[in-house]
Image: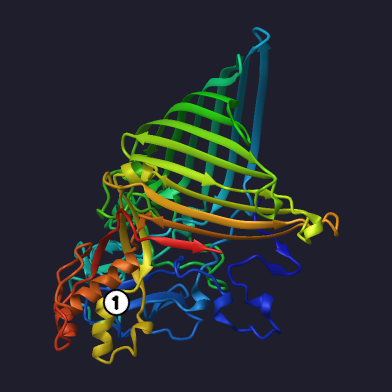
Amino acid sequence: MAFPSLGGITRDDDRLPLVAGTDFEGDASFNNRNTFGPFGQFDIQAPSNRTPIADDDFYLQPSTFTGCRLQFGGGICARNGETPVAAVRYNTIFGNSLISKKDRYNALALLSYELTDNIEAYFEGSYYRSKSVRNFDPSAILSAVPVGISRNAYYNPFGPTTRNGQPNPQRLPGTTIAADGADLIMERYRFVDVGNRIIDVEKESYRLVAGLRGNFGAWDFDTGFVYSEADTVDLERNRVSLTAMQRQINLTTPDAYNPFNGGCLDDPGLGDCTPNPAASIEPFRIDVFRKGGTSLALADFKISRDDLFTLPGGNVGIAAGVEWRRETFYDDRDPGSTGPSPSPTASPACSTAAMSPAPANRPIRTASATSIRHLQSCSFPWSARRWTFRWSRRSTSSLRAGSSVSPTSARPPRCRGSRHRGRPSGVTFRGAWSQGFRAPNLVQVNDDGTTRSNTRDDFVVCQAQVQKGIIASLAACPGAGVISFRSGARNLRPEDSESINLGIVLEPGFIPGLTITADYWRVKQTGLVGTFGDDNAIALDLLRRLAGSTNPNVIRQAPTADDIALFAGTGLAPAGRIERVIDPYVNLDSRVSKG
């Protein structure tokens, strides 16, 4: 389903027309168009005074826009700067689907059969299948993984003055770029002429349950076996191979891909009116798949009775059981997203960071027991006639998550007050205390590594800029693309928790149907499993550098001459550009929630 127009307003990332005539009119935060579009942004690997742009960073725009510094022809010009202005940005929902087209199928069967008067066999089976299709915005390069364009690339506008002994028709006049040309770095670009990505997702799952239940004597029992499996195939068509695309851009023949031809001049955010020929696109157009799934096998046996023995206040009941289960998952990535790439931190597919497949499994054994007992007496305080105590214990063992015991205790007395003493006719006090744990999931333990590209502030560089007076404060720090490498950790401990709940329930007899409750709860979690965060890691790098050390999880390139000059006199050691941030899953601090 493509986005239509409603009431003369086109569905667009630019929401400014929706707030026209209000206090928010003109507020740029309502324009969410993207800085990655068919009008690319580039960095000339030459001194900034060699072109009329007067800057080594420039982006393309229609010549009818203000700020043009160098004409490229075809109604396109170059404007200095790193970030395209709002008018040049791209409407990423152009041609997208509002919702996925989806087909779903379900089947369910329930069977039971009485083998004897005391034993029943049962079976449950279910099956689910779905298929969905949707359009998504065209592929774009990652901000943290720019694309190099050689000086010899056919469409490089700052290439050599001659090619094969003849004047180079692609080289722009009016520059003092060296005769052998200059390399470029493409930092922002979206392959709109390749078309919108098409995402097909197929899901399939089934669940089988078989067991016996009944009683033998005074004991009730239930035993069974469960097996379930879920699989997903995610196929994304119309993707761009980063490796093949870089090769196609850098061809020295006219069949090279040309990223300098812009898009639509009337509205740069709507499609590409000057697409490359299909022969230049097909060599790097790819489909990328991802297959993943989980399975669960479980067997258990449970018994219970409500009169294990009798106390003066009443019967004591018990429930106990044992359980075994095995969890597995697999994650199979297309070689197009995990194979060789121009960058070690990027996937061979554009718009995708590098990922690694990570199959895993974990067997788990559990034993549990619960006891319930009631005490009754007319001599309790406030003439309470019934108190209920519940105690339970659960022990779980996982080969990769360690072991933990989770006892719980609850004490909700039900007190019926005596009316002649003026007490409410119904008062219930309730309380519970428990300890528990949550084991890290299989991805958090076994993931071999996934990279993500995020816009982050390099506080170390910005601190130097603050001290040199280049920016006013760290709040003005300009963000840049940073690669974060996230991986599992075999030494993760389970999260532990302790909770307490206290409450009172009032049911006054003089107002029938009225119930008043008040509760207090508090949960403390320790060893929370998560990631420290690449932004926190960079901030920690600054903190440690101020003390004379560094954060080893922030990996930087060697400082350039410009970097050394920037840090001179700041008291900070020169720091190069961030190459990547190591951000594994770890056990974090504690957290207390209450209310």
Position above or below: 336 against 16: above
Q: Residue at horizontal 30%, vertical 79%?
A: 173
Mark 1 residue crowding within 10 angstroms, few (<14) / some (14–19) / many (20+): many
Q: Position of residue 12 (x, y in %)?
A: 61, 67
Element type where label 1 sits in the image = helix
Nearer to me, 87 or 561: 561
- Name the one closer to the observer, 169 or 111: 111
Q: Position of residue 47 (x, y in %)?
A: 21, 81
Judging depth in this view, the residue of 119 and 486 nearest the camera is: 119
The correct choice, above or below, for 14 with respect to 472 in the image is above
Residue 42 visible in this rendered orientation of the protein? yes
Q: Quadrant of the C terminus?
A: bottom right
Residue lying furthest bottom in this view?
A: 469
Q: Position of residue 48 (x, y in %)?
A: 25, 83
Left or right of 161 on screen, residue 313: right
Residue 45 visible somewhere in the drawing: no
- Name the residue at 67% across, 79% down: 19
Residue 569: % across, % down: 14, 89
In screen coordinates, is 440 left or right of 503?
left
Whether residue 338 is situated above or below residue 461 in the rendered picture = above
Instruction: Say left or right for 149 vs 407.
Output: left
Outermost residue, top side = 116
Residue type at mark 1?
Answer: Phe
Tell which residue pokes out farthest to the front in this image: 379
Tell me the residue that label 1 is attached to.
Answer: 459
